[in-house]
Structure formats: structure tokens, C-alpha cells
Image (cartoon, rainbow, N blue to C red):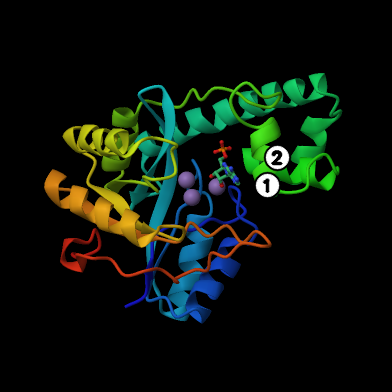
Amino acid sequence: MKIDLHNHSYYSDGVLSPTEVVRLAKEQGCDMFALTDHDTVDGLAEAKTEADKLGMQFIPGVEVSAMWSNMTIHILGLGVDAENEVLQAGLKQHQDFRQLRAEKMARGLGGAGVFGAMEKTQALAKKGMITRTHFAQMLIQEGVCKDMRSVFKRFLTGKKPGGVGGKWAQFDEVIAWIHAAGGKAALAHPFRYRMTNTKVKRMMSDLADNGCDGVEVVTGSSSKDEITLTSQWARELGMLSSQGSDYHGWPHQRIRIGHLLDMPNPENSIWRDW
Ligand code: AMP
Ligand code: MN
Ligand code: MN
Ligand code: MN
């Protein structure tokens, strides 16, 4: 079974439409696939239609931004009902914050000599949601930076001109939205938060204590050691294991849908009852 439960479309910061992502997943041999755009469920209906057409098992998902210990983390909601009002109200809050944050980022960039940042970035966002990825694309297009790595480092993080603090909902609230919508909550890419291993484990433990069902044990960028460690901690903490590529479809990316290293304990997987 080829399973990929973490993918983006242009409803957030991916390049492809939901239909195109689903087609690509099918071409890559996926049997089970989830679309998990940042803070929106708007692409799910289109993706489901295409997955049904192709006979691929579709899991409706979302990747929700959240605060843990004053840091931004990402929590996946898998198997969510997109029509659920609690989830929709929560996501709306995040979408509104994104709009305000974008305006603030644009002002910051203006102060650094990048003019018209809001308009130029908005033009790149296909479905209205503006992410930092769109700002990054804009800065690369304008010739201000040459690649994603440097643009985030120089402009879009911390106290840099386009850096803004996260004001997302607290992690326990986000878990509650996902549960209200009948989904399972899983911490995304645990090793991408610039934390020590001790802190990563503490975060997992804290999330588990607050009802988080699982953790992404295998992601498109995981090393073997990270997979072993996450899988071990998941067992200790009674969390289920998830896996997904975090495919965005940007050029020059090595990540491919459905191409993942093996999960050590598949019997402990989040999809075992699906
Ligand atoms: P946002 O949710 O708008 O703050 O944007 C976060 C997104 O930016 C993440 O989901 C990644 O896709 C992307 N991102 C964050 N940091 C980096 C980085 N250092 N290099 C490339 N992309 C990044
Ligand atoms: Mn992203
Ligand atoms: Mn993420
Ligand atoms: Mn993602």
C-alpha cells in the first residue's frame, strides 16, 4: 500500500490544483491520499471528486497552524468533515489572521525598500489565501533573493522585515476543532521546529496529554534516525503513527508524492481502521 497523508494544493501554498495533485498521486501509485492545505478545507470537494473518479481512497484533511509554548506548530486533521461548523469557525479565524498578518508583513517589507509587496504577492495567490510562501515567491520573482532558503532567512522569520509573530489558536483548541469535525489530530513534521530532541519529545507528550491522536513519523524530509526516534516516542506516549510527503509542487524540490521511507510500526498506524 502506498499512503501519503500530507499534501498541498493552490488553495494554500501548493502549486497544483486539487485535481492535479490527486492525478499526480494516482500516477505515483498512491492507494490512499489526503489533501491537507494550511488552514483551509476549500480544496477538499474538488479533490474528492477526482479521487473518486480515479478509484483512489481519499482522506479529507487540513494542516492547522497552532501555538505550543509560544511557538508555531502544525497539527494535521485527518478524516475531517469539511462542513463542520466548529472547524469552519476556527479556520475562518486563522484565515482572517492571515490577511492581517500579510498586510503587516507587506508594511515591514516596504520599510526595507520592497514596494507594492501586498499587491504583488496577492497576484501570486490563486485562491485568496496568502502564505509566507507567496511572499517568498514574490521576493524571488522581484530579484530580491535567489532562493526559498535565503528568502526565509533574510526576510520572513523572527525580527526580519517580513517576520511577524504567530497568533494562531492554542494547540489544545486546534485539537478540539479537529475532533469536533470527527477527525484525528496528528502533529506534523516533529523535527522541523528548530527544537532540541528533548523539547520535541516534551511537545509530543504535552500534545498526547491533550488528546492529540498521533504524530507524523515519516515525512518527505525525514532521516532514518528521526523516523526511528519518532516511532519509539509515539509508542511510549500511546500516539498513532502517520506519514506524508508534505508535497507542495515547487520547482527544484526533491519531495515526491507517495515516495517515503518505511514506517517502523505500521500496525500502530493512524489509518489502521480506515
Ligand atoms: P505560513 O503558514 O504562511 O507561515 O507559511 C509557512 C510555510 O512556509 C510552510 O508551510 C512551508 O511551506 C514554508 N516554509 C517555512 N519555512 C520555510 C523555509 N525555511 N524554506 C522554505 N519554505 C519554508
Ligand atoms: Mn506550506
Ligand atoms: Mn507544515
Ligand atoms: Mn504541509
Left or right of 190 on screen, residue 123: right
Write the residue at 35% across / 47% down.
77
Q: Are marks 1 and 2 in contact (CB under 8 Å)?
A: yes
- Spatial CA distance of label 1 from label 2 is 5 Å
Mark 2 belongs to which amino acid? Val
Most foreground residue, 235 or 248: 235
- Badge 2 marks a residue whose secondary structure is helix
Write the residue at 52% across / 69% down.
22
Tell me residue 142's x, y (percent). Answer: 85, 42
Look at mark 1 in the image and give the residue it sits on.
148
Look at mark 2 in the image and give the residue it sits on.
151
Residue neighbourhood size for the residue with mark 2, other residues' Cα within 10 Å, grouped as few (<14), some (14–19), many (≥20): many
Write the residue at 67% across / 47% down.
148
Most foreground residue, 201 or 19: 201
Most foreground residue, 46 or 218: 218
Write the residue at 78% across / 47% down.
146
Q: Residue 225 is drawn in which quadrant?
A: bottom left
Left or right of 250 on screen, residue 221: left
Q: Residue 19 is drawn in which quadrant?
A: bottom right
Tell me residue 247's x, y (percent). Answer: 52, 60
Left or right of 32 on screen, residue 198: left
User: Looking at the rendering, in which quadrant would you find the C terminus?
Assistant: bottom left
Residue neighbourhood size for the residue with mark 1, other residues' Cα within 10 Å, grouped as few (<14), some (14–19), many (≥20): some
